[in-house]
Image (cartoon, helix red, strand yellow):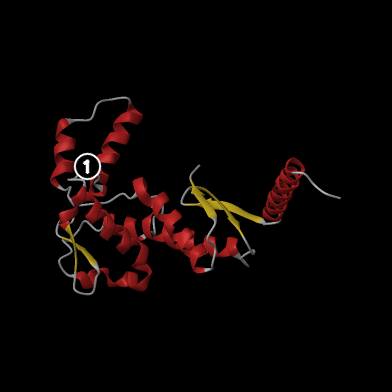
Amino acid sequence: MKLNYKTKGRVICLFFVLAILESCSNDEKIVTNRTEGNAIGTTYHVSYLGNKIKNLSQKIDSITFAVNHGLSTYQVNSMVTAFNSNSDSIWKIPSEFAHFSDDMQHFIEMLSLSKTITQETLGAFDPSAAALFEVYNKAKKDGVFMKDSDVEECKMHQGMDKIQFNDKGNPFKLDSLVSVNFNAIAKGYLVDIIALYLETNGVTNFMVEVGG
């Protein structure tokens, strides 16, 4: 059977349509894996394409536990809580912080990152305003205005420059009353850590959400 140009054109178009449909059909066969749970006082959701990672939920739980232990101000035994509560002496001797050993990784990374961001934003972002956050939250809860004297007292002990690192990379205070709160970036930091774990396991298409 001899085809005219118009018929040939239709056949060619039909061929490309079938090819596209076949491509879409193959795409639909790609499995979307999902896992979710609780982390740093909120929830997390992870979706990714490809082969399922064995024991991913347990691994993420271990990651969030470590991040919580380093950064959560709501945990009485966390590193940031211990760092903030050591107000009896000025930490000029870094060995006083050595009891945290190797578990300080996330806390140290967050301190270092925060110092950089505080400098780059000219102080617009400053986790060392933690004491001021507490005064504000208490005043808000009580339905009153903050006292100027309380604000000035907090500002006297504010500044990421009051926190330094020794030659071994361990943090210490130049002001015993300085404290930090990482709530503004802790969720984003956890997203980065989970994303890095997925990439390490060969996952390239994924979505990580912490906190809704």
The amino acid marked with disc number 1 is Ala
Vertical placement of residue 135 versus 89, above or below? above
* Residue assigned mark 1: 124
Horizontal and vertical percent for residue 148?
A: 15, 31
Q: What residue lies at 18% left-to-right and 64% top-to-bottom?
A: 91
Q: What residue lies at 62% left-to-right and 61% top-to-bottom?
A: 50
At mark 1, the secondary structure is loop
Q: Quadrant of residue 71?
A: bottom left
Q: What residue lies at 19% left-to-right and 53% top-to-bottom?
A: 160
Horizontal and vertical percent for residue 173?
A: 18, 60
Horizontal and vertical percent for residue 141?
A: 35, 30
Q: What residue lies at 54% left-to-right and 55% top-to-bottom?
A: 206
Horizontal and vertical percent for residue 4?
A: 77, 44
Q: Along the horizontal axis of the image, is 12 left or right of 195?
A: right
Foreground: 109 or 133?
109
Give neighbour class at mark 1: few <14, some 14-19, many 20+ (Cα, 10 Å).
few
